[in-house]
Image (cartoon, helix red, strand yellow):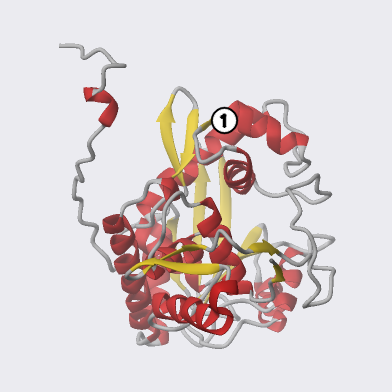
Amino acid sequence: MTIPVMSHLLDSVYSLLKESASPMHPKELATALIQRGMWSSKGKTPDATVGARIYCDIKKHGDQSRFIKAAEGLFTLNPNVKVELPDPGEKAGKAVKRKQPENSAGSCSFSDCAEKVLLHFSGNSPMHYRDITSKALELGWLKTEGMTPEASMYAQILTEIQRREKQGKIPRFEKLGNGMVGLTIWKSTGLERHIDSFNDKQRKVLMERMMQLNPQDFEELITTLLSKMGFSEVSRTPYGGDGGVDVRGIMTVHDVIHIKLAVQAKRWKANVQSPVVQQLRGSLGTDERGLIVTTSNFSRGARDEARRTTSHTPIDLIDGDQLVSLLVEYNLGVRKNRYQLLELTDSFFSDEEEIQI
């Protein structure tokens, strides 16, 4: 039987289970969905939400549900039901064939392209970064004018791995040696997922504590962060007469390039709007670059205004999620614990590999 699919969350669950070689628990599904940006949840128990939606689908459709319960708390796909996901341009409820990845007029970042290639063309096996780059270019996912896209691809993958580890997050990619790259979701253990879930909760607590700071202490926190990031001569402006600028500093590159930075710190719950961007731009001194840091987010208008470059100085933006990641990366308000997890390598004891003593 072929059925149309109309639930974004269940579509994403279906995609994950189709990639998985074994049944998955709702906690594993929720963690993977959030980690890969396939779904977001403001609730405190996203795994319960995922489990409930799957249970409801099974109860509603019976043996025609696309999911089945494989064991206690574990779900997999129903082999007797063929699912066809709707094309975004089709009306809901109309069954259409699920398309394979095809050439796209758009483009994505090197690392996002790498993830897409590994998900769709690797067969859950590692690929060489050159092959990943070649496939991304062939499909039109990757647009670059650089002369060495393979080197750029590998460099950005390695950089992302290092950065996410510093931020206390599980990296998307795994470096396997000799230029081979895989996805951590293929082999991440339940323990690793529990660690990632715990870290997410700590990041939320970190945000809550920032929201409890008074404006002056929040500005002091931003001052400390900029100093940790390598800025010099960082100082707060006199409170009340800052003209929209809360902190100033200078970034020196190789003792040659000096970048003056004027920062506005917003400990807000509401999104920052475009007038705030305009105000900061009007307060910039000679050769200064602007930066707005907030605990919330930016409206679309604010982001568009910040990107205006024609006869305007561009303004950089750091939203709440990025701010928390930077605090974790530079160990401000958090302390990282290092535990070594031992993982057996089956090939070491196999007949196919000679043991060197």
Nearer-the-camera pick, 135 or 307: 135
Q: Residue at x 37, y 56 (%)?
A: 329
Q: Position of residue 243 (x, y in %)?
A: 60, 81
Q: Residue at x 78, y 69 (%)?
A: 95
Residue that mark 1 sits on: 129
* Left or right position of 77 against 235: right
Q: Amino acid at mark 1?
A: Tyr
Q: Is residue 198 above or below residue 341?
A: below
Residue 248 visible somewhere in the drawing: no
Q: Quadrant of residue 45?
A: bottom left
* Left or right position of 202 against 265: left
Q: Residue at x 38, y 46 (%)?
A: 187
Q: Position of residue 275 (x, y in %)?
A: 71, 83
Residue 180 visible somewhere in the drawing: yes
Mark 1 Cα within 10 Å, few/some/many (few <14, many 20+)? many
Q: Position of residue 216 (x, y in %)?
A: 39, 83
Q: Quadrant of residue 168?
A: bottom left
Q: Quadrant of the C terminus?
A: top left
Callout 1: SS: helix
Q: Residue at x 44, y 84 (%)?
A: 43
Q: Position of residue 254 (x, y in %)?
A: 50, 36
Q: Quadrant of residue 73?
A: bottom left
